[in-house]
């Protein structure tokens, strides 16, 4: 086996569990400790199976209606007619409502958060563009996995993707806590080994959204001057940082290098976890813990839902940039133990991934890819392969768009 084969083989094997508990990638120990008190909630754990977005699901859900809805969405039509009628009534009642936090919270309160999560997937895929992209993602993931298992490295990367530079924009504390995956290290190494042009945007790991947005803007300006063709890939807190850079700080001529942006679990509209932590008296506890962790507390207020709403209202993303949102959609039985207290706290606001509400990751004009079965940290043994599949898919979409303009 060649050196290249050995290195890539390591990267495409199922990921091993970290030796120590993976710390929170964005609010670290402060949120974990401050939110744990009073965050526990009890809800049913009903075994359920089915399919969501071409993904086999075997987990537990929080209501009998959610269990039936999962089966119903999987094409299993036989069963309780009264539950089927109730599902139809709910879908009809909310069909014309925007897919936002208000709608999902109302559905969640009327049914359950798991029911609202399943509804979220259905509404996303009711959009024809999303549906086609989701089907393409599933097909490309299968193709890439097969070729990588066969060690056919060259064919695993689409020719169109080699035309672009992949600029990865990391999340919170990506240097101090590399186990979180916020630095995209594994994906970057694999793609580099496959001959792709990859680079990490060297943002400050615990600075404010505004300060990191300026750094991102400087990098994009430089790449635009060199006529680069960029695909940006951001995660979590880097989501609002990238949005601010592209949609407010930079002018239209300064974003000519950016052809696409893939937002992975983006905290576009913030998180209610930040709202709770910065409120007195928890704020002084959080400040103390952040100090012990040698972390700047200043980044936290910018992640509140109010600050995020004000910031978002001033952002207008360029229409020529292809935006893809990669959204993890867990059901209650899919939440990892170290995320559960935060997930439980957020349940009262609606379906969430353990850090933010699902609807708050969406952006106008964006194409949504859903990933059922995983929480905010995407601890999927196939995540590297799936990352390459998304990049391939985006590059192919850009090629089609370019040909249509000629």
Image (cartoon, grey):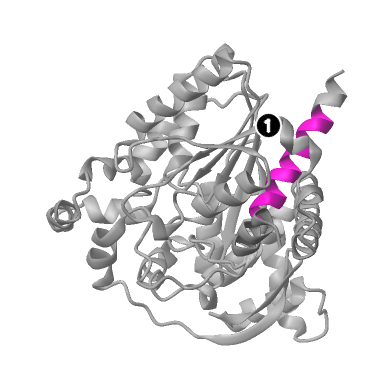
For residue 248: magenta? no
Check the image and report above or below for 51 versus 12: below
* Whole-percent x, y for residue 69 in the image: 69, 75
For the image, the number of numbered tags is 1
For residue 397: magenta? yes
Give the magenta-colored segment's residue range: 386-401
Secondary structure of residue under mark 1:
loop
Whether residue 100 appears in this view of the structure is no
Residue at 42% of width from left, 67% of height from top?
343
Residue sitting farthest toward the front: 2
Depth check: give the residue in front, 192 or 62: 192
Figure quadrant of the N terminus:
bottom right
* Whole-percent x, y for residue 124 in the image: 69, 53
Figure quadrant of the C terminus:
top right
Disc 1 marks which residue? 164
* Whole-percent x, y for residue 126 in the image: 76, 53
């Amino acid at each position: 086996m060649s050196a290249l084969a050995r290195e890539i083989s390591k990267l495409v094997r199922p990921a091993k569990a970290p030796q120590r508990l993976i710390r929170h990638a964005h609010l670290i120990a402060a949120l974990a400790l401050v939110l744990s008190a009073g965050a526990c909630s009890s809800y049913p754990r009903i075994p359920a199976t089915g399919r969501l977005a071409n993904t086999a699901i075997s987990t537990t859900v929080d209501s009998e209606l959610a269990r039936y809805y999962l089966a119903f969405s999987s094409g299993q039509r036989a069963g309780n007619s009264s539950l089927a009628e109730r599902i139809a009534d709910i879908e009809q009642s909310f069909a014309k409502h925007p897919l936002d936090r208000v709608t999902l919270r109302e559905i969640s309160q009327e049914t359950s958060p798991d029911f609202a999560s399943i509804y979220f997937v259905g509404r996303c895929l009711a959009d024809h563009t999303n549906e086609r992209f989701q089907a393409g993602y599933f097909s490309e993931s299968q193709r890439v996995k097969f070729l990588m298992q066969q060690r056919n490295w060259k064919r695993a990367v689409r020719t169109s993707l080699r035309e672009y530079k992949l600029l990865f924009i990391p999340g919170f504390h990506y240097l101090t806590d590399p186990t979180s995956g916020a630095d995209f290290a594994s994906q970057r190494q694999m793609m580099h080994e496959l001959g792709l042009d990859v680079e990490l945007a060297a943002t400050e790991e615990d600075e404010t959204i505004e300060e990191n947005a300026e750094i991102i803007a400087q990098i994009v300006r430089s790449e635009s001057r060199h006529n680069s063709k960029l695909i940006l890939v951001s995660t979590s807190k880097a989501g609002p940082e990238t949005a601010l850079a592209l949609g407010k700080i930079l002018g239209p001529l300064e974003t000519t290098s950016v052809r696409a942006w893939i937002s992975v679990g983006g905290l576009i509209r913030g998180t209610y976890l930040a709202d709770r932590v910065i409120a007195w008296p928890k704020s002084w506890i959080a400040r103390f813990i952040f100090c012990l962790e040698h972390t700047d507390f200043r980044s936290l207020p910018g992640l509140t839902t109010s600050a995020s709403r004000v910031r978002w209202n001033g952002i207008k993303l360029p229409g020529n940039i292809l935006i893809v949102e990669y959204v993890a959609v867990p059901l209650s039985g899919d939440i990892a133990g170290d995320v559960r207290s935060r997930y439980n706290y957020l349940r009262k606001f609606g379906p969430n991934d353990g850090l933010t509400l699902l609807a708050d990751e969406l952006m106008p004009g964006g194409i949504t890819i859903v990933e059922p079965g995983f929480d905010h940290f995407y601890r999927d043994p196939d995540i590297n392969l799936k990352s390459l599949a998304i990049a391939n898919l985006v590059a192919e979409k850009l090629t089609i768009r370019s040909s249509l303009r000629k």
